[in-house]
Image (cartoon, rainbow, N blue to C red):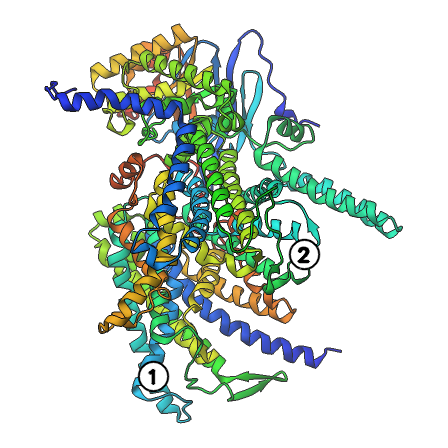
Amino acid sequence: MIDSHLVATLTQQFFNALTLGAIYALVALGYTMVYGIIELINFAHGDVFMVGAFVALAFLSTIGFTRSISDPLQLILVLVGTFGVTMIVLGTIGVGIERFAYRPLRNAPRLAPLITAIGVSFILQNVVQAWQGPSPVPTPQLLSPQVRFGLFGADIAVLSIVILGITLALMIALQLFVGRTRLGRAMRSTAQDREAAQLMGVDINTTIAITFFLGSALAGAAGIVYGLYFGSIQFNLGFFSGLKAFTAAVLGGIGNTVGAALGGFIIGFIEVGAVQVGLSRWSEALVFAVLIIVLVFRPAGLLGQQLGERA
Amino acid sequence: MSAPARRRPGRDAIDRWTPAVRAFYEAHRSISIFVGTAVVGAILPIVVLIPPLSGFLPQTVWVDTFAGAGIFVLLALGLNVVVGLAGLLDLGYAAFFAIGAYAYALSASSFTNVHIPFWPMLLIGAFVAATFGVLLGAPTLRLRGDYLAIVTLGFGEIVPVVFTNSDELTNGTNGIAGVDRPTLPGIVFGSSDPWPFYIVILAIIALVLIFLYRLQNSRLGRAWMAIREDELAAASSGVNTVTTKLLAFALGASTAGFAGVFSAGRLVFVSPDQFGFTVSFTILAMLVLGGMGNMWGVALGAFTLFIVQSVFLKQLTNFVHPLGLPIISNIDFVQYQFLLYGIALVVMMLLRPEGFFPNVRRRRELHQAAPSEGSPEGIDAAGALQ
Amino acid sequence: MTEAILVPPEDPGKDLLLHAERVTKRFGGLVAVREVDLEIPRGSIVSLIGPNGAGKTTFFNVLAGILDPTAGRISFDGRVMIARPIRPWLEPLVWVGPAVVLALIGAILGNTGQTSVAEVLGLAAIAGLIVMLLLAIVRPLPYTRFLTRIGIFKSARPNDMVLAGVGRTFQNIRLFQNMTAMENVLVGMHTRLRSRMFDALFSTPRQATEEAAARQKATEYLNLVGLPGREEETARNLPYGDQRRLEVARALASEPQLLLLDEPTAGMNPRETAEMTELIGRLRRELNLTILLIEHDMRVVMGVSDRITVLDHGERIAEGHPEDVRRNPKVIEAYLGAPAE
């Protein structure tokens, strides 16, 4: 006799996990793409995600949409506009960071760009803190989470489905871009063997810039999603979420975009699972434990990929 | 291939004497360090009696600030062993600081009703921290720089979280108050008198400097340098990279342990938010700005940054505020110090990665940045060795 | 229950310093080294030659402990040092075993009411776990021997091989570029210095005497390889040929019985090559070294080797005296290709 209450709770949490996982997946993609191409963990990436959320907020405030929209057509337009603008802005920011903070250090010993990335992370956090204050800031929930439908006795927000749809669309678009276009090929070849790609005529600087653009744009999208779903954002959002997304990227196999998406969802499930069994205070520690276990026992991750040989 | 010798009498004299001076210093290094620290320690409280410094704070508060700076000098020296000497980027160093502090707080406070005296606890706390240094360092041994950094960052976060969530043991977010002060016959370590603390921290710093210099110029110090240069070649020359790295973690952690015990005894209060990532980051900033690998540089960097942070930023705010300049007068520099640190870090890495007081060797390393070649022998997907 | 593979082979009178038997190394689908045998008698100079990609450096790396073999074994000085790991997964059980046992006993005692003893046992369990983990990390020799006795074998790591008496140089020079020549050689001496952290911290007399003696010895090594007076020069600033000599000096500093030289004359002009060849001969004579050489320069190989082993596509295709190997048709074919028609 299956407990219908249990089924309802599980379904509810399942969708929560999917939504959370989608956010992590989007951010993880940026980590994994950047690592794949220049073997740098972009510490500032989590904060790019955070900035995305705030940029979306600023945009929405400027065009005057600060509450939920009931007209579907209008909603779609606003969403498209928000995503479009935010992603472009964040992409540009990402390219800027790469150009000024990372590119000069491309041949320096490993320590240097890592430290710089931390510096950039702090700069981003503090700039946003100066701009919007240290307290949580409410964000417009354009699609009200109150709009729900029933499934197996659980109350699922339509918002979740929309978010999942958007995320999947973005991920598929990324895969198509990387897999089918000339620029995507350039990205993949640079990730495999930079010198050979260069010899084949690939413009390394542009390729890396594009990688950062895409990764940051996706992080920006994740930021919008976060704001839409949770309704409140804060300047230090990037730090922990960034680390969890990084864990997701490692879990899936760093350098592997499908792995990053997979890892994102798994981490989402772990986190929601932890909350469900009452361990919410330990959810961060739990995710870090996952990271450590993966790195120690299976550093290549689930869908592990052979990287370049540089020691 | 040597250039023909030219007649340079002045230079010749200096060149003739410098080795002698250096020989003297090296032969009597420990004494030199001791005397040097004592001299610096004596001068500082006098310097602050001179305006404008005397106008910022009364002398007792200055000395108290120096004691606080001393804690961070210790922390920076310890992190220097891990990051600067052995080349292991540890971003969670504050965890060991926390462990030292809590070890003391749990062994000498009204909270637990255990009262082990301060002085043995200095050693015990350092030892406990060293043990955790080994335990937390062990999983990172086969990881490459970036991954090592992230994992240590993770540990750096987990430790305060553990302290926060273990209410029965550690009183959670409220922290442990009523920690015992140090005691010495005839000397009172009171809350209003910073001088005993100041002198104690100076002594600890001198001792740690002496020990660290000795290590740097020993078999172990060379092994650390070798690992930092080329880990595979080091292993192939006989260096046990595992134990050598763990020793780096252990020694770095033990220094943080000293600092933690001292800090707890001075503040008589410990709580998890004294040990967050911002602390780890601050110490790292001190290393970067001061000059990684060079102990005096690091000490100076730590001291300078601490004083800037605790005294000068506030003074700057007070100074700039009444001037009525457009944006600048509205900035509370204290609040945005981390923005400044972030910018400083980026700028330093781009322009002067060896820090303000660099080690000659380090400057060489960082400016002729050809990565070491070497065939990809036995290196797997995540770059882990074997 | 020591596995058969770990019992060293018989050595009827041949006095082999190194004995590699059927060593195989596979990377996924690619077999880089296939069933290669190699015997190196004490005091001899053996060359390993073959076209590019034949697997020579891979074999070297297995020998040096950098790679674990997929099959086969290598005995050094009568002891099996390198073989495919046996039951490595069992090791974690060894780590937690004592702790679990102690904890169980403690639990049982706790249930029968003896709580204080139970608590002590609980603490002992934790302590035991930590001790075992430390042993696992540090891997001192008694611990590895114990593991072998109970059927767990971990192949030697590079520093284990150095400790046992194998020194090596690299095909692409891997000096410590920003350290001086003296410091490079001193690192090479790492395994032979007896001073430890304690001696360094407390500046014991042993430390002082040993450091002075070590520097003296390092100077001698530098003189031996032809770098007199260059102690304080930074490795990075040395000319190419001198860098190669420095690498040899560093390898010599570990007082090896067997020296592995990976293409020591690569990139050298004829004069430097002749000097290196002469050095190799001198090393065998003056230091009683046994030497294994990977070389492409046939003049060096012919001039200095007692025996030659030829690899091609990962397999051994010839072995013997230099003159015999030179005339071996298989060897000629490997290098020059099959004769037309």
Identify the element where label 2 is drawn: loop
The correct choice, above or below, for C68 with respect to A290 in the image is above
Pick the front one: A166 or C58: A166
Q: Residues within 10 Å of mark 2 (few under 14, many from 20)?
A: some
Mark 2 residue type: Ser
The correct choice, above or below, for B129 with respect to B5 in the image is below
**x%, y% of residue A106?**
28, 49
The answer to which image quadrant residue B84 occupies is: top left
Q: Which residue is mark 1?
A: A60
**Alpha carbon distance from label 2 to label 1:** 54 Å
Pick the front one: C246 or A154: C246
Which quadrant of the figure contains the N terminus of chain C? Answer: top right
The correct choice, above or below, for A310 with respect to A239 in the image is above
Identify the element where label 1 is drawn: helix
Output the chain of dot 1: A
Q: Which residue is mark 2?
A: B110
**x%, y% of residue A191?**
33, 52
Output the chain of dot 2: B
For the residues labelled 2 and 1, say whether their Cβ atoms are less than 8 Å apart. no
**x%, y% of residue A301?**
49, 53
Residue furthest to the bottom: A71
Q: Which residue occupies 34% across, 51% down?
A: B49
